[in-house]
DNA sequence: GTCAAGTCTTGACATGTGTCCAGGCGGGGC
DNA sequence: GCCCCGCCTGGACACATGTCAAGACTTGAC
């Protein structure tokens, strides 16, 4: 919308043409300079996507929030969908290890439970734009076939991520888990999604709501 | 710049103007013919929205799937957003009583549980387009303020709908509920959303997955 | 029949979007 | 020196979309 471009620095990066040959690699990574640029573009694209949402974000919006012109995006990505899927994968790499530290470091059941709840609340507030983008993409995958493979893969990865927390929690509590991985993830994710919606509407209690629900939900997943 | 700089009263004589008077009704329903047309347009608009998704659906798409030209939509709705919100409300009225019959008719805990699971599976398959549209709208409400009031209202109504099922189930089982309404809805909804995604990707096990999860989840929400 | 209000259609305009094209800058090999 | 080539820019085209304008058809009251 507005042209709030900060400093229009000129930098470089183009990498398109050599598609006719080879082909198994959609865009040939010429130098590692190019890969770096792709990540750089993906980074700022994710910020824009998190603000505007998947459908309302144009390539010009993405370029405007970066330091490049709108055609650089076409230099590094053959297509808009290729950019999106690249961004999605880039996003996954960032968020998927979010709870690994607390899984590795916690030594009691109550500790891992508390730290998990804390981390949930922290990321709810700090990364709310990224989270709503994820829910946006996952929902769009219900309509667009191209998004499905990546979304399903990420969803499975997130399920594993939650499952690692839960199995560690159960082990520390010396009690068995009574739900399977898919159901547990669906429940935790449902609670998180609802808390996110409330948080984004300005509800100041959303964070504490999420913490309370996490603290009461997890013990309920354990057996006798 | 454009020609609608200032002032420029719109001199349309139709459903539009009467804002100066009364006001609480945004568009004056001239005859009941008008209301009927609005519902008719909302009906076909919902079908199109369910196919294409909220963002990819244009007014021309909606009109093309109806028997009218694309400008009729502007005759009956001042705005695209007014059409959308009207459709959302129209949608709510259709789906919100989905489980009322089985709540009223079931006489045992196992019966209401089984019938609820059956109904979940049935609507998952039969109304999958409407469900993904709902999730789409709810996610878009995280980005667009205009959608929030309606989405939050519908979400609360759906929460009540689930809560009626659960309280009746608990009463028939003569056991107490151990979760609050918001958490129960978030969990059930999370499971349903995940099953919907799987169903839409062509997973033939999605329906049975949903049934199993419902049958094991609900008893878990009851106390001793 | 006449007329006016309601209803609907055809056509157009301004804007935004994805994509393509022609060219400019700068460095490295000859 | 020079030329080639990877990087990047600005402008342009083709199309879609929301909105607007003006006219045509319908209907009912007089």
Image: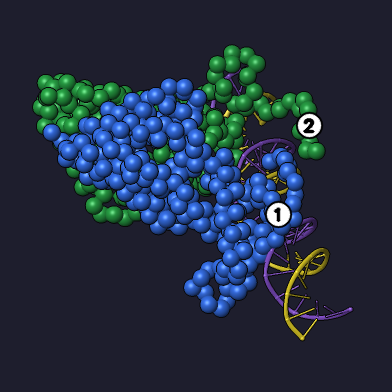
Chain colours: A blue, B green, C yellow, D purple
Residue at image location 54% in from the left, 29% down from the top: B146
Q: Position of residue A20 (x, y in %)?
A: 57, 76
Based on the displayed image, in which of its 4 quarters is residue A117 positioned?
A: top left
The C terminus of chain B: image quadrant:
top left
For mark 1, give the secondary structure.
loop
- The circle drawn on residue B5 is 2
Q: Position of residue C29 (x, y in %)?
A: 73, 81
Residue at image location 31% in from the left, 38% down from the top: A106
What chain does badge 1 belong to? A
Pick the residue in front: B148 or B12. B148
Q: Position of residue A59 (x, y in %)?
A: 62, 52
Is disc 2 on the same chain as disc 1?
no
Q: Nearer the viewer, mark 1 or mark 2?
A: 1
Q: Are marks 1 and 2 in contact (CB under 8 Å)?
A: no
Count residues near mark 2 (Cα–Cα under 10 Å), then give few for <14, some for 14-19, many for 20+.
few
Number of numbered markers: 2
Q: Which residue is mark 1?
A: A69
Residues at marks 1 and 2, CA–CA distance in whole angstroms: 31 Å
What chain does badge 2 belong to? B
Residue at image location 70% in from the left, 61% down from the top: A12
The N terminus of chain B: image quadrant:
top right
Q: Position of residue B15 (x, y in %)?
A: 59, 26
Based on the displayed image, in which of its 4 quarters is residue A76 positioned?
A: bottom right
């Amino acid at each position: 919308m507005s042209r709030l471009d900060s400093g229009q620095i000129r930098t470089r990066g183009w990498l398109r043409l050599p598609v006719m040959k080879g082909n198994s690699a959609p865009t040939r990574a010429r130098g590692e300079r190019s890969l770096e640029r792709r990540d750089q573009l993906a980074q700022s694209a994710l910020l824009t996507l998190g603000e505007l949402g998947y459908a309302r974000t144009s390539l010009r919006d993405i370029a405007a929030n970066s330091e490049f012109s709108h055609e650089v995006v076409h230099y590094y990505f053959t297509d808009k969908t290729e950019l999106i899927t690249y961004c999605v994968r880039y996003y996954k790499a960032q968020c998927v290890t979010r709870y690994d530290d607390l899984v590795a470091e916690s030594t009691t059941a109550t500790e891992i439970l508390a730290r998990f709840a804390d981390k949930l609340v922290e990321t709810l507030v700090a990364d709310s734009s990224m989270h709503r983008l994820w829910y946006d993409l996952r929902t769009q995958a219900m309509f667009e076939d191209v998004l499905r493979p990546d979304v399903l893969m990420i969803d499975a990865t997130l399920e594993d991520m939650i499952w690692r927390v839960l199995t560690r929690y159960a082990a520390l509590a010396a009690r068995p888990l009574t739900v399977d991985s898919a159901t547990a993830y669906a429940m935790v994710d449902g609670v998180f999604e609802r808390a996110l919606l409330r948080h984004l509407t300005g509800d100041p209690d959303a964070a504490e709501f999420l913490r309370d629900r996490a603290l009461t939900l997890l013990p309920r997943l354990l057996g006798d």
